């Protein structure tokens, strides 16, 4: 396994009292067991953790005795064993789905290749081949050219309806993934979102984000995540508010209320003097 889910709450609930050195030993053991998909002996555990000093070896020994169970000379943890088994079961199921899909494609290609295309000016049975500039005729010489051509044209094949998608089928996200129409409609009704929002432009950021993770999810889970993704984008866009426009304030205020004639003597000509 190249990755595994690490539940931080569960880890600290069970291993919260470990020392820093013991935390390092436990983390290295977890990574090694998931990566190698097998459990170590005592010597292998010390080697996997690169323990050299007496304190490091003691930390590895303590972690093995605390969180692993000795079975036939190997230190086993039930949770790791269950997750590795589930990973292999999922991988096997994905392989079977891929093989069935490829087999269906090969069958479809083979059937399309066996269909013989009509040959232009091919003579019907029991009739001599046509010579140059000779009009095609049937055995009774009674059909017109238009009627004969209409009989020779192959009928168009009816379009096959797309196979229904299994909502519980696990798939890996790809850039060209598109949600199943029925599943999308169901989850849109549940989340209160319009189906018209799910264009290729809206789905593209979702697939680009999740394609790099390499996660396996069932179809219904991917559609549910997509609907929530688009709904959150819509809510964020609707919550955008422009900043209020502030009027510039002048520092020179109070001139209109000031009495400039206060303390002055009014002259006869209307002017003022001190």
Image: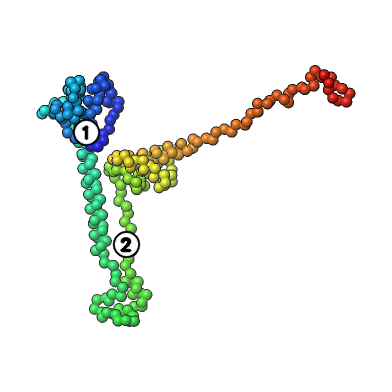
Residue drawn at point x = 32 percent, y = 66 percent: 155
Quick one: which residue is furthest to the top in this view?
263
Q: What element carries label 2?
A: loop
Q: Name the residue under label 2.
A: 157
- Count of numbered circles in the view: 2
- Residue 75: x percent and y percent? 15, 27
Mark 1 or mark 2, whichever is nearer to me: 1
Quick one: which residue is furthest to the right in this view?
268
Q: Are the two marked residues, 1 and 2, in contact with CB atoms closer than 8 angstroms?
A: no
- Residue 263: x percent and y percent? 80, 18
Q: In this view, does 226 lie to the left or right of 49?
A: right
The answer, for residue 230, to whether it is visible in the render is yes
Residue 85: quadrant of the picture:
top left
Residue 270: quadrant of the picture:
top right
Work out which quarter of the rendered image holds the C terminus and state it. Answer: top right
Quick one: which residue is furthest to the left in this view?
72
Q: Is residue 240 left or right of residue 67?
A: right
Q: How packed is label 2: few (under 14 Cα within 10 Å), some, or many (20 or more)?
A: few
- Residue 239: x percent and y percent? 49, 35
- Residue 272: x percent and y percent? 83, 22
Q: Name the residue under label 1.
A: 34
Residue 52: quadrant of the picture:
top left
CA gap, disc 1 and disc 2: 52 Å
Residue drawn at point x = 38 percent, y = 42 percent: 206
The answer, for residue 77, to whether it is visible in the render is no
């Amino acid at each position: 396994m190249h990755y595994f889910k690490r539940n931080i709450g569960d880890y600290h609930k069970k291993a919260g009292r470990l020392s820093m050195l013991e935390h390092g030993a436990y983390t290295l053991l977890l990574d090694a067991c998931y990566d190698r998909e097998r459990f170590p002996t005592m010597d292998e555990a010390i080697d996997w953790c690169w323990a050299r000093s007496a304190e490091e070896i003691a930390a590895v020994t303590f972690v093995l005795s605390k969180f692993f169970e000795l079975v036939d000379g190997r230190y086993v943890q039930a949770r790791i064993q269950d997750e590795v088994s589930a990973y292999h079961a999922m991988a096997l199921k994905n392989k079977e789905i891929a093989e069935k899909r490829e087999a269906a494609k090969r069958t479809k290609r083979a059937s399309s290749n066996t269909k013989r295309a009509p040959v232009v000016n091919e003579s019907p049975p029991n009739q001599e081949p046509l010579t140059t500039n000779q009009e095609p005729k049937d055995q009774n010489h009674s059909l017109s050219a238009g009627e004969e051509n209409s009989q020779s044209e192959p009928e168009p094949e009816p379009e096959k309806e797309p196979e229904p998608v299994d909502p519980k089928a696990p798939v890996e996200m790809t850039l060209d993934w598109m949600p199943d129409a029925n599943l999308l409609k169901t989850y849109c009704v549940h989340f209160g979102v319009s189906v018209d929002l799910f264009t290729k432009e809206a789905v593209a950021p979702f697939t680009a984000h999740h394609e790099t993770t390499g996660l396996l999810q069932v179809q219904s889970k991917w559609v549910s995540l997509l609907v929530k993704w688009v709904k959150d984008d819509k809510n964020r866009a609707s919550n955008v508010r422009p900043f209020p426009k502030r009027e510039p304030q002048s520092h020179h205020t109070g001139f209109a209320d000031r009495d400039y004639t206060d303390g002055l003597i009014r002259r006869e000509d209307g002017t003022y003097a001190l």
